[in-house]
Image (cartoon, rainbow, N blue to C red):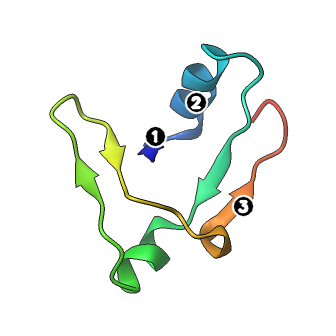
């Protein structure tokens, strides 16, 4: 899963593929539970999966 560092970037990337749906990821809680994150060579954060309990939808147009 590709992650953006901020909401503005996430919305911009999402708009490339239609109407964006942006979810906030509680990465700190994920990391505290031992889930891993990786920084790709092009600066994109990646993780294998994000369990639903770490997701919060943002209001439209955030």
Of the image marks 1 and 3, the number of the one nearer the N terminus = 1
Q: Quadrant of residue 26?
A: bottom right
Q: Is residue 61 above or below residue 15?
A: below
Disc 2 or 3, which lies upstream in sequence?
A: 2
Q: Residue at x 52, y 63 (%)?
A: 50
Return the residue nearer the eye: 7 or 38.
38
Residue at the spot of label 1: 4
Tell me residue 35's x, y (percent): 36, 75
Number of the front mark, 2 or 3: 3
42 on left or right of 31? left
Q: Position of residue 43 (x, y in %)?
A: 24, 34
Q: Nearer the viewer, mark 2 or mark 1?
A: 1
Q: Are marks 2 and 3 in contact (CB under 8 Å)?
A: no
Residue at left offset 66%, top offset 68%: 52
Q: Is residue 17 above or below residue 52?
A: above
The quadrant in which the C terminus is found is top right
Quarter occupied by residue 48: bottom left
Left or right: residue 56 compared with residue 2: right
Marks 1/3: CA–CA distance:
14 Å
Disc marking residue 8? 2
Query: In the rendered view, does 58 fall on the left or right side of 9?
Result: right
Separation of marks 2 and 3 at Cα, in angstroms: 16 Å
Work out how far the residue at label 2 is from the one at label 1, CA to CA, in angstroms.
9 Å
The circle on residue 25 is none
Residue marked by disc 3: 56
Q: Are marks 1 and 3 in contact (CB under 8 Å)?
A: no
């Amino acid at each position: 899963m590709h992650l953006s560092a901020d909401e503005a970037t996430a919305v911009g990337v999402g708009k490339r593929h239609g109407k964006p749906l942006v979810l906030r990821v509680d990465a700190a809680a994920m990391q505290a539970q031992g889930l891993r994150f990786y920084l790709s060579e092009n600066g994109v954060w990646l993780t294998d999966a994000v369990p639903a309990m770490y997701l919060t939808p943002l209001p439209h147009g955030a």
